[in-house]
C-alpha cells in the first residue's frame, strides 16, 4: 500500500473512532466505510483495518485497566473502619 493511502486511512480512522465515542454510535465506522467503498476499495480496506486496530486496542486497554484494578484491590491492605 502507498504511504498516502495508509496515512489517510489512519487519520480518518482516528477521527471516526473519536466521533463514535462522542456520538455513542459504535457502528458509525460502517457507514463511513460504505461511503468510501463507492469510490475506493483500497481506501475502504485500509480504513477498516485501521478502525479494527483502534477498537481492539481500546478493548485491550479497558481489559488491562480492569484486571489491574482487581489485582490492586486484592493486594490493598484491609483496614478496619
Image: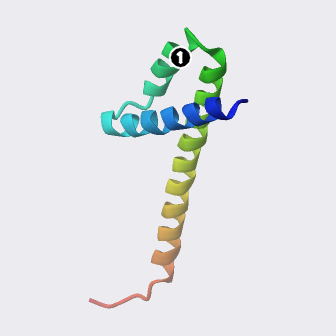
Nearest to the observer: residue 65 or residue 32: 32
The colour scheme is rainbow
Looking at the picture, how far across and down is residue 51, in whole percent?
55, 35
Q: Is residue 42 left or right of residue 24?
A: right
Looking at the picture, how far across and down is residue 15, in whole percent?
43, 36
Q: Is residue 63 above or below residue 79?
A: above
Q: Is residue 9 above or below residue 56?
A: above
Q: Where, quadrant-wise, is the C terminus in this rendering?
A: bottom left
Residue located at (62% from left, 31% from top): 4
Looking at the picture, how far across and down is residue 28, in whole percent?
43, 26
Nearest to the observer: residue 8 or residue 78: 8
What residue does disc 1 label? 36
Disc tally is 1
Q: Is residue 41 left or right of residue 22?
A: right
Residue located at (48% from left, 39% from top): 14
Q: Where, quadrant-wise, is the N terminus in this rendering?
A: top right
Residue located at (53% from left, 73% from top): 71
Looking at the picture, how far across and down is residue 9, in whole percent?
57, 31
Nearest to the observer: residue 56 or residue 73: 56
Residue located at (45% from left, 76% from top): 73
Outermost residue, top side: 38
User: How would you rate the neighbour count of disc 1 (Cα within 10 Å): few for under 14, some for 14-19, many for 20 or more?
Assistant: some
Outermost residue, right side: 1
Image quarter for residue 63?
Answer: bottom right
> Circle 1 sits in a helix, a strand or a loop, which is it?
helix
Amino acid at each position: 500500500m502507498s504511504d498516502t493511502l495508509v496515512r489517510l486511512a489512519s487519520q480518518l480512522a482516528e477521527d471516526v473512532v473519536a466521533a463514535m465515542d462522542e456520538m455513542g454510535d459504535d457502528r458509525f465506522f460502517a457507514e463511513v466505510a460504505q461511503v468510501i467503498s463507492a469510490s475506493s476499495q483500497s481506501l475502504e480496506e485500509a480504513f477498516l483495518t485501521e478502525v479494527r486496530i483502534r477498537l481492539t486496542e481500546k478493548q485491550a486497554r479497558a481489559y488491562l485497566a480492569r484486571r489491574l484494578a482487581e489485582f490492586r484491590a486484592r493486594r490493598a491492605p484491609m483496614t478496619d473502619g
